[in-house]
Amino acid sequence: MTAAHRAMTLLESWPNLVSGPPKCTVGQAFASAGHEIVHFHTADSADLHLTRTAVERLLPQLRHNSAIRARPGASWITVLLDCDADVELLLGLVSVALKEHSEEAGGDARSRPSPPCDWERPAELPPVPAARPGAARRMVDRLMPHGHGH
């Protein structure tokens, strides 16, 4: 089981979160009172809607953690999920996000919809051209004087 699957399993038990497809249509989302809180787009990361205010406030601390990807001015951050400590970090930040959304709405969490996540699909790499037969050997011969390494 991946760290992302462990996190999703734990979040399924939270009474204030509902799982389903995200608005961006890729992966699994967890929402609360109309706000998408966390998205799992890949098996090794989660995108979390902390709110712009919370990201700005927490950015100095977030930058010290190698599992966090955050940009100034963004309301979403990415948590890289590699181990149990990353899952615990994500769960703590989900708690912060839930509190932020509640406070930002002044108690009425439905007053303002959450902005779409800024997840970008990984760019497809261009196809690698097929190597000509013997090309690797000619490259090695150029790098190594003849008679060495043969």
Image: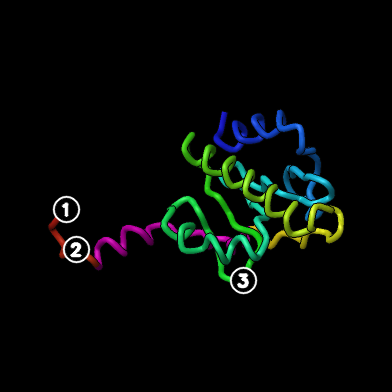
- Cβ–Cβ below 8 Å for labels 2 and 1? yes
Label ID, residue 73 = 3
Is residue 147 shown to the viewer in this render?
Answer: yes
- Where residue 117 sits: x, y (%)? 72, 59
Q: Earlier in the sequence, mark 1 or mark 3?
A: 3
- Where residue 45 sits: x, y (%)? 58, 47
Q: Quadrant of residue 49?
A: bottom right
The amino acid beneath tag 1 is Gly
Query: Magenta includes 138?
Result: yes
Q: Marks 1 and 3: which is nearer the front? A: 3
Q: CA distance from mark 2 to mark 1?
A: 8 Å
The amino acid beneath tag 2 is Met
Using a 10 Å C-alpha cutoff, classify the residue at mark 1 as few (fewer than 14 neighbours), some (14 to 19) or many (20 or more).
few
**Label 3's element?**
loop
Q: Nearer the viewer, residue 25 or 131?
A: 25
Report the residue that reaches farthest toward the left. 147
Query: Magenta includes 133?
Result: yes
Using a 10 Å C-alpha cutoff, classify the residue at mark 3 as few (fewer than 14 neighbours), some (14 to 19) or many (20 or more).
few
Magenta: main secondary structure: loop
In the shown orientation, is residue 114 left or right of residue 84?
Answer: right
Which corner quadrant holds the N terminus? top right
Provide the residue designation for mark 2: 144
- Cβ–Cβ below 8 Å for labels 1 and 3? no
Label ID, residue 149 = 1
The amino acid beneath tag 3 is Gly
In the shown orientation, is residue 29 left or right of residue 66?
Answer: right
Q: Which residues are magenta?
A: 122-142
- Where residue 57 sits: x, y (%)? 55, 63
Q: Marks 2 and 3: which is nearer the front? A: 3
- Cβ–Cβ below 8 Å for labels 2 and 3? no
